[in-house]
């Protein structure tokens, strides 16, 4: 009986370690925010469709990062494509480091960013092997209007009517 | 002493906490080019030259696309906390007010005085005009929309924001759908530039313009001498001393008129009240009424947040 408990405990510890390692790996890749973002289409009600290409040595991790990278791209990088270009939501490029604590929490696993990005579009995923890592592209929808309001409320972005 | 300091500090905090700049009014209007292309113009014979004047009433009654575009832009600006004036409602309001005033008759038999100037001023206007233009381009079986949105400052005539683009050719049959997409797709760029304009205004002061004229019954002009200085020179000095960063530009000057553009005035006056062209110029009027000028009759015509006409020698 004791042996059984010992084995079960070891298995559980091993699973936790694997999960922690996967999460660590995911966070490492995410922290660097290595991705490309392309504009696809503006939908109604403030939604925008973007294609995000994420990089990782594991294709499943790269795919999982795409949603987070899409929100990051809309906030900090802006995007272009289809003959048009779109500015990022923040105009101050230093804001990411100035408000590092805020954005760390915002982009945490299952953090508030999840509320502003939809599921990956079915059939949109593309996986390419680039050197030793994978480049994975998916199309996602970002609720840009709601995201902007969230950032306005948090004092990250100035609203158009501030000061009046 | 402590009490005075505390009161002053409280007053300062109150002013800074509650001071808000005057919010410019914004209205969407179709461009003259769109009105002419769609036949919503009236033709005027100006001494042998055909001049086309946009007929906004006809446009609002005759184009569903225009109504949709204005409604969409109103929605999007409302989401940004900046509700717009509605062109159709403003036109109706002007017509109703004029009709009502014409029928007013007091107990003494008097009626409401409306000068010719009042009648001319009584037109659809706003501080910033969002001028919209679009047309549908056919590429084979596909259609796309060419769309331009310009934010024009009514007083400086500057374009303070703009966005344009041609949508991707689509098999979509209904141009209204393409148009709605074009409005939505170009809005962020437009608002971004408008935000930059407001940021500049808060940093460097509101940009306004003044027209200084003299009355034909006034015995003096802008070249009249006061203590060895021409009045035009005195006015120049006053604007230098009182403008934000000494920024203003005299674009036209003679002995009978002076035009000042790009005049930067503080957003708030010394009492913390929101400033505009009319409030800012009150100090100049007081200055000219005092010694040694003693110009008693000065008429100020307020033309909105950003423009005033000052007539010297007229009350």
Image: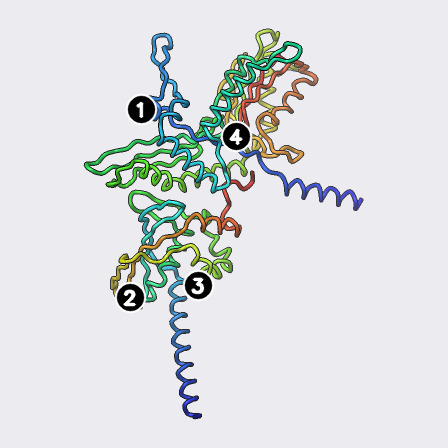
Chain under callout 2: A
Q: Are marks 1 and 4 on the same chain?
A: yes
What's the distance in space between the residues labelled 2 and 4, CA to CA?
55 Å
Q: Nearer the observer, disc 1 or disc 4?
A: 1
Chain under callout 4: B
Q: Cβ–Cβ below 8 Å for labels 3 and 4? A: no
Residue at label 1?
B37
Colour option used: rainbow
| Residue at 54% in and 42% down | A162
Location of residue B189 by image quarter: top left
What's the distance in space between the residues labelled 3 and 4, CA to CA?
47 Å
Location of residue A138 by image quarter: bottom left
Crowding around mark 3 (Cα neighbors within 10 Å: few <14, some 14 to 19, many 20+) is few
Provide the secondary structure element on which disc 4 rests. strand
- B182 or B100, which is in the foreground? B100
| Residue at 60% in and 19% down | B300
């Amino acid at each position: 009986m004791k042996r059984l408990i010992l084995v079960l405990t070891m298995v559980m510890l091993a699973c936790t370690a694997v999960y922690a390692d996967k999460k660590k790996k995911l966070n490492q890749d995410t922290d660097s925010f290595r991705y490309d973002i392309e504009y696809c289409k503006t939908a109604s009600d403030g939604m925008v469709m973007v294609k995000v290409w994420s990089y990782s040595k594991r294709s499943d991790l790269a795919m999982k990062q795409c949603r987070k990278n899409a929100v990051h791209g809309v906030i900090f990088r802006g995007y272009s494509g289809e003959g048009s270009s779109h500015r990022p939501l923040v105009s101050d490029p230093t804001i990411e480091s100035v408000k590092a604590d805020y954005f760390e929490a915002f982009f945490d696993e299952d953090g508030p960013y999840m509320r502003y990005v939809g599921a990956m579009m079915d059939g949109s995923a593309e996986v390419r092997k680039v050197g030793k890592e994978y480049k994975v592209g998916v199309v996602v929808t970002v609720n840009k209007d709601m995201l902007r309001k969230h950032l306005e409320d948090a004092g990250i972005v100035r609203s158009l009517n501030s000061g009046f | 002493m402590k009490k005075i300091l505390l009161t002053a500090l409280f007053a300062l905090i109150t002013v800074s906490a509650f001071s808000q700049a005057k919010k410019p009014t914004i209205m969407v209007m179709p461009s003259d080019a769109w009105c002419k292309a769609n036949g919503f113009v009236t033709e005027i014979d100006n001494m042998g030259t055909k001049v086309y004047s946009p007929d906004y009433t006809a446009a609002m009654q005759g184009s569903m696309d225009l109504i949709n575009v204005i409604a969409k832009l109103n929605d999007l600006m409302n989401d940004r906390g900046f509700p717009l004036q509605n062109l159709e409602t403003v036109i109706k309001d002007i017509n109703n007010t004029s009709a009502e005033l014409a029928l007013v008759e007091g107990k003494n038999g008097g009626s409401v005085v409306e000068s010719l100037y009042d009648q001319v001023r009584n037109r659809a206007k706003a501080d910033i005009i969002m001028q919209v233009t679009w047309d549908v381009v056919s590429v084979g079986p596909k259609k796309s929309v060419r769309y331009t949105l310009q934010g024009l400052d009514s007083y400086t005539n500057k374009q303070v924001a703009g966005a344009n683009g041609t949508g991707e050719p689509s098999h979509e049959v209904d141009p209204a759908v393409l148009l709605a997409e074009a409005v939505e797709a170009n809005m962020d760029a437009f608002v971004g530039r408008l935000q930059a304009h407001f940021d500049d205004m808060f940093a460097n002061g509101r940009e306004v313009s003044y027209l200084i004229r003299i009355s034909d019954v006034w015995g003096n002009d802008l070249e009249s001498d006061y203590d060895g200085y021409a009045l035009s020179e005195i006015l120049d000095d006053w604007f230098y001393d009182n403008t934000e960063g000494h920024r203003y530009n005299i674009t036209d000057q003679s002995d009978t008129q002076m035009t000042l553009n790009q005049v930067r005035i503080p957003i708030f006056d010394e009492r913390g009240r929101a400033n505009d062209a009319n409030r800012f110029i009150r100090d100049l009027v007081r200055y000219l009424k005092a010694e040694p000028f003693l110009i008693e009759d000065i008429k100020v015509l307020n033309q909105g947040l950003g423009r005033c006409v000052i007539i010297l020698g007229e009350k």
